[in-house]
Image (spheres, rainbow, N blue to C red):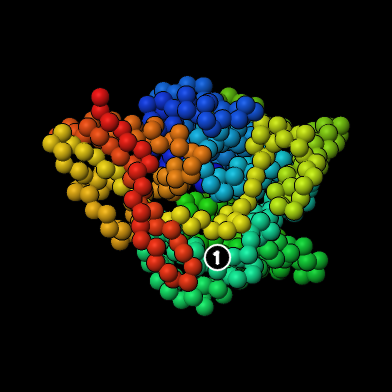
Amino acid sequence: MGVALLIMFDLAIRVSDLELFYANTGAVPLTMLFEHSWNDYYISFHAINGLWQVQFILFCISWFFAVMLFMGYRTRLFTCLSWLMLLSLHNRNGLILQGGDDLLRMVLFWGMFIPWGARYSCDSILLPHKFKYTTICTVATVAYLLQICYIYSGSALLKGVEWNKDFSAMYYVYGLDQIVYPHAKKLFYYPELLKKLTCVAYYFELLVPLLFFIPFKHQWFRLAGIISIILFHALNGFTLLIGLFPLIGIVTSIGILPSLVMDKLDVVFFKMKATVSVSFKNISVLINKIIRWKTPVYELNKYLENAKTAVLIFLIVFVFDWNFSNLTFIHSKLSDGLRPLGYVLRLDQNWGMFAPGVFKDDGWYILEGITKDNKTIDLMNEGREVNYKKPLSVTALYKNDRWRKYTENMIINYNTFMRGYFCNYYKRIWNETYPEKRIKTLRIVYMSEFTVPDYKYAPPIRQILWECIET
């Protein structure tokens, strides 16, 4: 249910930038995608047509699948369909993706093999005799648990000396104005605290998965690990502009809550159970009448079950090897010959968040527009006169984390192809929206403020990344 809500929330955020990021009239048209940012093994329904209307229809289909997943109606089917649509969406525009997107996609992938519709779902009410699980321990649940381990230990193992020797990483993290909220910026001025936070963050990521494998008092240690993960993500979400990653991390960890917690929740919600069951049953019957599907059958014969288990074991080894091969000291990669499989299913992953070192090319954007009467205005500041001083809040310049990620990628030299498309799009939209302030020239200006060690000051440097001139 949590994963379904995340998908719906994510779609709601993305649809507000439907044309910008997904249509041919936006900043990421299909011509640019296929020429510069496409993998031949990718599958994407969203890349079939560049009309925003088509994209909107696909968004609505994805939303419907997520609603069905939330209700737990034919859970496995709608898990598969939601994963397929999410994979398609991610392949359409990888320039705005971050680690949370990879995690959500992987959770849905392993969820296809887990009977997570066994409780609190329409399926469990319609077919109570099919779901008599008290605990679930299968190959798929092992894969799910290992996936969570890769996020944390895998990330720690990719980190460099800033994290595990001189402990300066948090100094650079909280020095990044484009990602740190203003209320969290105060932490930047406590160097000893930042070193301790770096140490805690590094060893937390490295060691927290061990709590899931302690054989004695196993459920209590697992619960301690989950609570630690929730607190870790809550702190990150409160201080950093990193989109849905904290929520995805929290919801993912809830998926491995031990039985002792779920049993307590059953007791708490026991009084609500009858009412909820009746409501869900009525809804399920209504959906069956509308869609006219037969009641789902979940049993597989012995041979199919064995085949599924064999495939899962292979995929577990494959994903483990993919993550293991990301380590810098590994030169022989078993999965090299099978990497197309990873790209087709989007099992490819790299949890190098702030690794090996923290991004230091900090700064902020100014969109310099020159009007017909030669006035210079800043399009990112509602058309006011250009001011090169650092804004009080750099994060406030971004509509959401997708914009921040897109502009972060635009700084990188090998992504220069992005700049012209974005410049032309923004110029056209501005002139259509504000004809009285029509501009003839637009410059993408990046005020680069490189983060240097020991609180030394590097003055901002004005860099013109691109210029669109009206002909």
Identify the residue shown where x is 69% and y is 58%.
157
User: Mark 1 packing: few (<14 Cα in 10 Å), some, or many (20+)?
Assistant: many
Identify the residue shown where x is 77% and y is 70%.
217
> Which image quadrant for residue 251?
bottom right
Percent across and percent down for residue 280 are 55, 42
Query: Viewer-proximal residue, 71 or 17?
Result: 17
> Which image quadrant for residue 337?
top right
The amino acid type, in three-letter code, at marker 1 is: Ala
Q: Is residue 223 above or below residue 50?
A: below
Query: Viewer-proximal residue, 411 or 189?
Result: 411
Percent across and percent down for residue 421 are 39, 32
Identify the residue shown where x is 71% and y is 52%.
327
Is residue 466 at least partly visible in the picture? Answer: yes
Element assignment for label 1: helix
Percent across and percent down for residue 195 are 55, 73
Q: Which residue is mark 1?
A: 169
Q: Is residue 114 above or below residue 59?
A: below
